[in-house]
């Protein structure tokens, strides 16, 4: 009955002509019921991708999806024209790859390939505990996957060619030459699918590459793949066909909006600033010292520095500490909290406290293992503790003073 009641509450909130975001966030903070695309829609609203006014949704989505289509055209197609021979390739003025001129398009092309190879490496290992990212999407981006007469390379072809160019040529005793690639695909990495098919990890790769190109000041930083993974997965889980067809564009803009809030965590020069990751780690330590002085003192005695574990917790929004369903549940609360990522501080502190007995009983190696490979704990236990920590502490009233009566 409680579940049905919550579903009804969400339906009522989301069917309003103008969504009351405060009311919606209050509902989402306690967890969003799965199914019917509720979470997908709620996240898009809370991340500012969709406006509260329902009658503006169609126009907003149409505009944003057209904009992303243009990004794909400019970043992947236009910037790579002439890199692949096609039937009309003679129509293009092809710059020479060995041109030493700094203004040569090939200089930028080769630098971009370095970024692309890092993104490719990270996306091939995205969420290895589930098979979702390895399987083919129902809606591959036809602008960049079909047509044998293309005069540009797809990202897949660029990665392959870059590896071939970095191969070593060996000659055996018979004088025959063969190639041996410097980089071999690890068994744990995902492989590409056949022509005109795209695995979900390849779609994520394209989103991250376009983001890096459009944000040269930040570019791509390792770990961003762990941020976009849950977003993309949730949007793909929406049962509505129209939303599934445009997952790539929707995920791109929601990821961009999310990164605008947490990008300082990925900028090394800001680590020690008031908005950097160093200050967030300090806040976790301060809260733990206030709420559990004994555990704090023990971790200090063990010289358990936050850089060893909470750096990753905070930077990646706990996306590597829990199973994907639990990460998604945590993000419901993070996105819904009015102060957004302040609640993350309380969750991290709660993670210490719910395993305090194990931490206090262990030596340095045991403690390190527990914090770097967090044990399975029911996520509701951790969130309940975090909510308890978030509430203002009640100061116990002083005991009433009894008046002394003078003897008569």
Image (tube, rainbow, N blue to C red):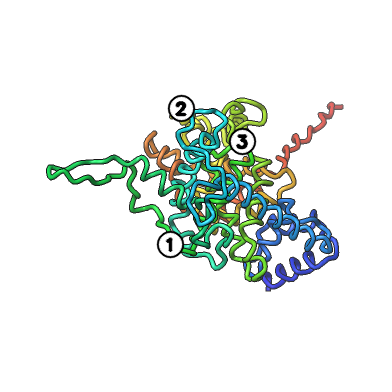
Is 222 situated above or below 251? Answer: above
* Mark 1 closeness class: few <14, some 14–19, many ≥20 residues within 10 Å: few
Q: CA distance from mark 2 to mark 3?
A: 42 Å
Residue toward you, 154 or 65: 154
* Mark 2 closeness class: few <14, some 14–19, many ≥20 residues within 10 Å: few
Which of the marked residues, 2 or 1, is nearer the chain's N terminus? 1
Residue toward you, 251 or 15: 251
Q: Residue furthest left?
A: 173
Q: Secondary structure at mark 3?
A: loop
Which of the marked residues, 2 or 3, is nearer the chain's N terminus? 3
To which residue does mark 3 refer? Answer: 216
Which x, y percent locates residue 182?
32, 41
Which x, y percent locates residue 317?
58, 45
Q: Please tell me the numbered disc located at residue 221.
A: none
Closer mark to the observer between disc 2 and disc 1:
1
Residue toward you, 345 or 258: 258
Among the 4 quarters of the image, the one containing residue 381: bottom right
Q: CA distance from mark 1 to mark 3?
A: 30 Å
Which x, y percent locates residue 401?
79, 32
Classify the position of the N terminus by image quarter: bottom right
Q: Are marks 2 and 3 in contact (CB under 8 Å)?
A: no
In this rendering, position of residue 31 left or right of residue 401: left
Q: Does the rendering let one see residue 353?
A: no
Residue plotted at (58% across, 29% down): 278
Q: Please tell me the numbered disc located at residue 193.
A: 1
In this rendering, position of residue 290 left or right of residue 108: right
Which x, y percent locates residue 145?
52, 60
Among the 4 quarters of the image, the one containing residue 88: bottom right
To which residue does mark 2 refer? Answer: 301
In this rendering, position of residue 57 left or right of residue 368: right
Residue plotted at (70% across, 61% down): 41
Residue plotted at (71% across, 67% down): 6
């Amino acid at each position: 009955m409680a579940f049905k009641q919550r579903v009804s509450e969400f339906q009522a909130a989301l069917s309003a002509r103008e969504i009351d975001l405060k009311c919606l966030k209050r509902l989402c903070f306690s967890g969003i019921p799965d199914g019917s695309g509720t979470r997908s829609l709620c996240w898009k609203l809370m991340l500012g991708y969709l406006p509260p006014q329902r009658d503006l949704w169609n126009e907003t989505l149409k505009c944003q999806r057209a904009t992303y289509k243009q990004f794909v055209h400019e970043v992947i197609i236009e910037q790579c024209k002439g890199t692949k021979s096609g039937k009309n390739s003679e129509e293009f003025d092809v710059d020479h790859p060995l041109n030493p001129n700094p203004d040569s398009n090939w200089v930028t092309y080769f630098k971009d390939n370095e970024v692309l190879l890092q993104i490719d490496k990270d996306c091939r290992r995205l969420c290895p505990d589930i098979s979702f990212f390895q399987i083919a999407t129902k809606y591959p981006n036809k602008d960049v996957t079909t047509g044998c007469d293309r005069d540009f390379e797809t990202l897949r072809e660029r990665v392959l060619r870059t590896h071939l160019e970095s191969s070593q040529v060996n000659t055996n005793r018979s004088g025959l030459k063969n190639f041996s690639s410097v980089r071999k695909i690890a068994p744990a990495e995902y492989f590409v699918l056949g022509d005109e098919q795209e695995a979900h990890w390849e779609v994520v790769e394209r989103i991250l590459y376009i983001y890096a190109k459009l944000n040269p000041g930040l570019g791509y930083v390792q770990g961003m793949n762990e941020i976009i993974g849950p977003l993309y997965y949730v949007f793909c889980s929406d049962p509505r066909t129209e939303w599934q067809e445009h997952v790539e564009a929707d995920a791109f803009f929601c990821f961009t909006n999310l990164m605008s809030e947490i990008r300082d965590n990925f900028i090394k020069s800001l680590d020690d600033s008031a908005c950097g990751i160093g200050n967030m780690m300090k806040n976790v330590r301060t809260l733990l010292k206030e709420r559990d002085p004994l555990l704090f003192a023990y971790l200090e005695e063990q010289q358990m520095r936050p850089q060893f574990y909470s750096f990753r917790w905070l930077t990646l929004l706990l996306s590597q500490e829990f199973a994907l369903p639990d990460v998604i549940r945590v993000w419901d609360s993070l996105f819904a909290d009015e102060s957004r990522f302040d609640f993350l501080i309380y969750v991290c502190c709660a993670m210490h406290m719910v395993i305090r007995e194990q931490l206090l009983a262990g030596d340095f190696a045991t403690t390190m293992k527990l914090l770097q490979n967090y044990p399975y704990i029911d996520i509701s236990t951790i969130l309940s503790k975090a909510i308890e920590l978030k509430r203002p502490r009640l100061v116990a009233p002083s005991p009433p003073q009894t008046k002394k009566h003078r003897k008569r």
